Amino acid sequence: MNRAARRSLGGAPGAYRDFDATELFCPRCRRAVPVRKRLLLVLPEGDKYEYLCAFCSASVGTKVSRGGPPLRLIV
Ligand SMILES: [Zn+2]
């Protein structure tokens, strides 16, 4: 049994600032699958990533990663 993996699942949702989903449900494979992360867009509020099924490359979800502190606007 992998203790570290179990512990990482125990936290409350949103507790991790840069939480990465490692397995998502794929509608094509009809099961939870490991995913690959692909950068889709760079937005003012963060980088938008798409998650692709590792087996069939179907898109299984997107996420906006809010990296650092907000950018300072020079007025
Ligand atoms: Zn799939």
Image: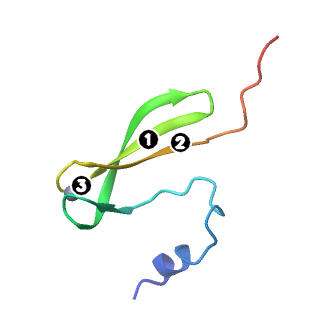
Task: Note whether ligand 1 is within 8 Å of mark 3.
Answer: yes
Residue for badge 3: 54
Q: Is residue 43 above or below residue 20?
A: above
Please state if 23 lies on the left or on the right of 67 as rendered.
left
Quadrant containing the N terminus in the rendered view: bottom left
- x, y percent for residue 20: 48, 56
Mark 1–mark 3 contact, CB under 8 Å?
A: no
- x, y percent for residue 58: 23, 48
Residue type beneath disc 2: Val
Q: Nearer the viewer, residue 58 or 39?
A: 58
| Residue at image location 44% in from the left, 59% down from the top | 21
Residue for badge 2: 64
- Mark 3 neighbour density, 10 Å: few (under 14) some (14–19) many (20 or more): some
| Residue at image location 17% in from the left, 52% down from the top | 56
Quadrant containing the C terminus in the rendered view: top right
Of callouts 1 and 3, the N-terminal one? 1
For the view shown, which residue lies furthest in the bottom direction? 1
Residue for badge 1: 49
Residue type beneath disc 3: Ala
Please state if 34 lies on the left or on the right of 2 as rendered.
left
| Marks 1/3: CA–CA distance | 15 Å
Please state if 29 lies on the left or on the right of 21 as rendered.
left
- Mark 2 neighbour density, 10 Å: few (under 14) some (14–19) many (20 or more): some
Q: Is residue 62 above or below residue 33?
A: above
Q: Is residue 66 above or below residue 32?
A: above
Q: Secondary structure at mark 3?
A: loop
Give the quadrant of residue 53: bottom left
Mark 2–mark 1 contact, CB under 8 Å?
A: yes
For the view shown, which residue lies furthest in the top direction? 75
Task: Note whether ligand 1 is within 8 Å of mark 1.
Answer: no
- Mark 1 neighbour density, 10 Å: few (under 14) some (14–19) many (20 or more): some
Q: Ligand 1 is found in which quarter of the picture?
A: bottom left
